Image: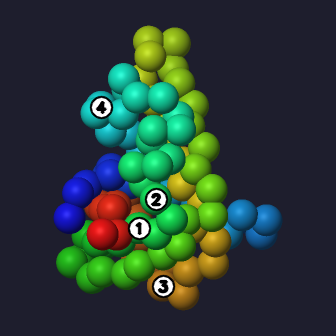
Amino acid sequence: MKQIMKVEDSFSTNEAGVIISGVNPEFDSLEPAEIKKYIGSKVRIVSNDGQELEANVRDVAISESLVGKKNISISLGEIKDVEKIGRGSIIYMNE
């Protein structure tokens, strides 16, 4: 499995469902379309306690800091076990 990022923050909204965010220095040199293609339409999440779950990707938002570092936010919609996704969880490509 190819790692996308480690979760730095996760939260839920009524409109977007669960949103996770993090960074991956490998993405800093890529264009947003390349990053979205890399992430794909599904991801695998491995929680801190080792439990795995799959989630559909609704949307990907990419922001860039003043020093050129990209922050990736992934909207996952509704997830049954949202409490398992916390800071430090690892997001992988769902190959």
Amino acid type at mark 2: Gly
Compared to 81, does 75 lie above or below? above
Amino acid type at mark 4: Pro
Amino acid type at mark 3: Asp
State the image quarter where residue 95 is shown.
bottom left
Q: Residue at x 33, y 50 (%)?
A: 5
In space, the residues marked 4 and 3 are separated at their CA atoms by 28 Å
Task: Indicate which disc, 4 or 3, sits on the residue closer to the N terminus.
Answer: 4
In the visual, does 26 lie left or right of 70?
Answer: left
Task: Indicate which disc, 1 or 4, sits on the residue closer to the N terminus.
Answer: 4
In space, the residues marked 3 and 2 are separated at their CA atoms by 21 Å
State the image quarter where residue 79 is shown.
bottom right
Q: Which residue is identified by label 1? A: 43
- How far across and down, in percent of the image, does residue 80 sit? 54, 87
In the visual, does 70 lie left or right of 78?
Answer: left
In space, the residues marked 1 and 4 are separated at their CA atoms by 19 Å
Task: Verify CB contact (< 8 Å) between mark 1 and mark 3.
Answer: no
Compared to 7, does 83 lie above or below? below
Q: Residue at x 28, y 33 (%)?
A: 26
The outermost residue toward the bottom is 80
Q: Which residue is identified by label 2? A: 40
Q: Residue at x 45, y 41 (%)?
A: 35
Tag 3: Cα neighbours inside 10 Å, few (<14), some, or many (≥20)? Answer: few
Tag 2: Cα neighbours inside 10 Å, few (<14), some, or many (≥20)? Answer: some
Residue closest to the eye, 30 or 62: 30
- How far across and down, in percent of the image, does residue 76 sit? 57, 67
Task: Verify CB contact (< 8 Å) between mark 4 and mark 3.
Answer: no
- Eye-nearest disc, 2 or 4: 2
Q: Which residue is identified by label 3? A: 81
| Quadrant where the N terminus is found in the figure | bottom left
- Eye-nearest disc, 3 or 2: 2
